[in-house]
Image (cartoon, rainbow, N blue to C red):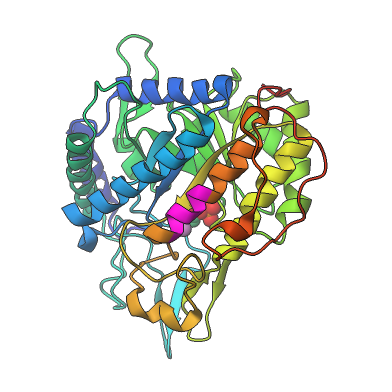
């Protein structure tokens, strides 16, 4: 959380946002919770994706439309494998606040406060620009409203499929709190800044403010589950965040890293299954696989991400639990931020179109390739449609990273934990 210099100014901005209309409606939020509960019941799939950090400068029709279209195209590929419509959730219309591992950023000999997302301060490397400015919360509100307006015009309700939903990390609590609205029928509080909110890996402490906030809202919520998560701690989190054990309420978004997933994920799956906690398991193959190039650009290797996805499916197949979704940092624009993929981008290519303000994103062709590979994993889990997994056939760009499975794969409907 940033430290604002002027608490009165923060309170004034909060007060104004509190008086504005909600960005999403309680009825829509309830619909998403229902759709996620259906994923439990019918072994469906959720696709969540978008920028690591949305940027005010990138607020344009082309930008929003390209990622929206890409999510739709990927959902079609995945839906073909699951035979159910895939629930689409954008990391959009509010992904403006970033947790940082370090409070400062140093370029050459100069150290300044870290960039914390456009809702907090500016990406510009300048002393003044890096001060947290509370009026940015109001800018974020209107940018989110404009984004939602475009998304709604592209995705009109009523054609029978699930609507397009939005999400972001519930990090900047003054903003989230200002968008709380109370349901007239049940009296429950909803965070109407987005349909789905998640708690980041850095702020998921059981006695922390972010868990306390999320506990009090009725939205479907997620928690990022990183390598330091202990099984008993995770079970406790599921009890605190989903005391009624409602299907659809809680999604665990695992981001272990390709090197650790085989060791770290199974004990967590086992603990949550044994405790009979109802959760959706989603794979974020991005955040555990970040590295730095020789010139200091953050990147991710497509092969490592793919390896983590395979490890995720592998662990679920062993334990009879259900892999229910994919969470990606991606954009419909032709950026060069991640290494590998169909065009076999290399480190030297990254400078050509590196535009992320925060973490490296998959571009359109890399994201589509990922969707195709995940669709193959999903088909493999369904005995009726099982096809041999031949990674090398995928545009020739993927190598065998794991041995072929030898154990029988349990049917996707036999899920003990559910
Ligand atoms: C993110 O999703 O951009 C992020 C910061 O993730 P995590 O909390 O998993 O590190
Ligand atoms: Co990120």
Asked if the magenta segment contains residue 370, the reply would be: yes
For the point 70% across and 27% down, the residue is 411
Determine the residue located farthest toward the top in the rendered image.
185
Identify the image quadrant of residue 73. top left
Q: Is the C terminus in the top left, top right, bottom left or bottom right quadrant?
A: top right
Left or right side of 407 for 90: left
> From where the camera sits, is residue 206 visible?
no
What residue occupies the far bottom of the structure in this picture? 109
Q: Kindly indicate the quadrant of the structure image that contains residue 156.
A: top left
Most extreme residue toward the right is 407
> Which stretch did the figure color magenta?
366-372
Residue 352 falls left or right of residue 311: left
Establish if 316 lies above or below 38: below
Percent coordinates x, y for residue 311 in the rendering? 69, 50
* Label tally: 0
Of residues 381 and 241, the one nearer the viewer is: 381
**In front here: 1 or 270?**
270
Q: Quadrant of the N terminus?
A: bottom left
Q: Is residue 50 above or below residue 240?
A: below
Residue 71, image x, y percentages: 37, 45
Task: Tell me: residue 126, above or below residue 102.
Answer: below
Q: Nearer the viewer, residue 214 or 223?
A: 223
Whole-percent x and y of residue 415?
A: 70, 24
Q: Residue 370: x percent and y percent?
A: 50, 53
Return the residue nearer the eye: 361 or 271. Answer: 361
Main SS category, magenta section: helix
Residue 234 lies in the magenta stretch: no
Q: Is residue 24 above or below residue 118?
A: above
Residue 155 seen from this side: yes
């Amino acid at each position: 959380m940033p430290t604002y210099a002027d608490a009165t100014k923060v309170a004034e901005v909060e007060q104004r946002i509190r008086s504005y209309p909600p960005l999403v409606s309680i009825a829509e939020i309830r619909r998403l919770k229902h759709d996620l509960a259906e994923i439990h019941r019918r072994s469906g799939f959720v696709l969540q994706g978008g920028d690591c950090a949305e940027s005010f400068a990138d607020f344009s029709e082309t930008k929003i439309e390209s990622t929206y279209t890409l999510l739709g195209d990927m959902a079609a590929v995945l839906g073909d494998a699951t035979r159910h419509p895939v629930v689409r959730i954008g990391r959009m219309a509010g992904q403006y606040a970033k947790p940082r591992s370090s409070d400062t950023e140093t370029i050459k000999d100069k150290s300044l406060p870290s960039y914390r997302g456009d809702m907090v301060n500016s990406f510009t490397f300048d002393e003044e620009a890096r001060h947290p400015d509370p009026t940015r919360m109001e800018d974020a509100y209107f940018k989110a409203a404009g984004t939602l307006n475009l998304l709604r015009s592209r995705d009109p309700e009523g054609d029978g499929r699930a609507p397009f939903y939005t999400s972001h990390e519930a990090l900047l609590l003054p903003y989230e709190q200002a968008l709380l609205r109370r349901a007239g029928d049940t009296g429950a509080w909803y965070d109407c800044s987005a349909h789905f909110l998640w708690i980041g890996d850095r702020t998921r402490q059981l006695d922390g403010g972010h868990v306390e906030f999320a506990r009090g809202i009725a939205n479907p919520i997620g928690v990022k589950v990183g390598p330091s998560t202990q099984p008993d701690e995770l079970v406790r989190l599921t009890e605190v965040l989903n005391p009624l054990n409602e299907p659809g309420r809680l999604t665990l978004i695992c981001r272990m890293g390709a090197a650790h997933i085989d060791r770290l994920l199974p004990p967590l799956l086992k603990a949550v299954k044994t405790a009979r906690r109802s959760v959706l398991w989603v794979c974020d193959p991005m955040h555990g696989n970040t590295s730095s190039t020789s010139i200091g650009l953050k990147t991710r290797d497509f092969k490592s991400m793919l390896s983590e996805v395979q490890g995720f499916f592998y662990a679920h197949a062993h334990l009879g639990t259900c892999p229910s979704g994919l969470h990606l940092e991606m954009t419909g624009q032709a950026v060069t931020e991640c290494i590998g993929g169909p065009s076999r981008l290399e480190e030297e290519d990254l400078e050509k179109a590196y535009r992320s303000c925060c973490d490296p994103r998959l571009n359109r062709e890399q994201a589509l390739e990922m969707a195709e590979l995940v669709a193959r994993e999903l088909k493999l889990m369904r005995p009726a449609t099982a096809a041999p997994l031949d990674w090398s056939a995928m545009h020739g760009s993927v190598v065998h990273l794991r041995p072929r499975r030898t154990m029988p794969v349990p049917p996707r409907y036999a899920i003990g934990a559910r």
